[in-house]
Amino acid sequence: GLDPRIGPQFLRAGLGFGGFCLPKDIQAFIWLAESVGVDFGLLKETERVNRQRIELLLEKVRRALWVVKDKQIGVLGLAFKPNTDDVRFAPAIEVISRLVAEGAQVRACDPEAMEKAGALLPPIAYHRDPYEVAKNADALLITTEWEEFRRLDWERIRDLMARPLLLDARNLLDPVQMKALGFDYHSFGRPGC
């Protein structure tokens, strides 16, 4: 687009957007439009599609595991974007809350956001070491595209997991490489994933 603030990084398929500004601004524009009798359908649809991304990830988890109750699920990423500790409206918070409500045992890792996430989430286990999050996991979800997650030893992670089920909700990793390593790899908006 012409606006330099909206580059390719904002136009990728994935788990959806979060943070404080964009969701709040969209809601404000919808309210403002409705206050003058205008139906701002495009922004309403933007909100709906963003919420649907969380549902899509949860459905992928359910389809792959059949039953979420008592499953060990690792989550890599809590912040709404990398390089911040901001978890306001972060999709990972909603995903984890819903998984816990369904009876999953969740372990999470985030380089900066674990303390703030702890104030919003039901009780889960937090680990600074992503390999601890992967240990004995029935599924591993990538919910924030931290660069350090890209550089993990994915062969080691596969070997640590109870089942090599990897749901990359941020399209951080190469699907061909992950499948070659033996992962049951799922991502968003990519053919065959």
Image: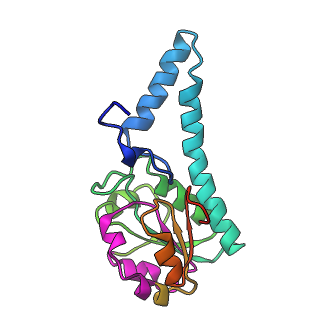
Number of marks in picture: 0
Q: Is residue 68 visible?
A: no
Residue 138 in percent (x, y) is at 58, 80
Q: Nearer the viewer, residue 98 or 83?
A: 83
The part of the image, by quadrant, that contains residue 68 is: bottom right
Q: Is residue 92 left or right of residue 34?
A: left
Image quarter (top left, top right, bottom left or bottom right) of the N terminus:
top left
Residue 64 horizontal side relative to residue 17, left or right: right
Instruction: Write the residue at 33% across / 31% down.
Output: 3
* Rendered location of residue 75, percent (x, y): 47, 69
**Residue 172 visible within the image:** yes
Seen from the viewer's position, the closer of residues 119 and 112 is 112
Q: Residue at x 42, y 64 (%)?
A: 172
Q: Residue furthest top?
A: 36
The image shows residue 82 at horizontal and vertical percentages of: 32, 57
The verdict on residue 177 being magenta is: no
Residue sitting at x 43%, y 46%:
18
Tell me the quadrant of the picture where the C terminus can be found: bottom right
Q: Which residues are magenta?
A: 128-157
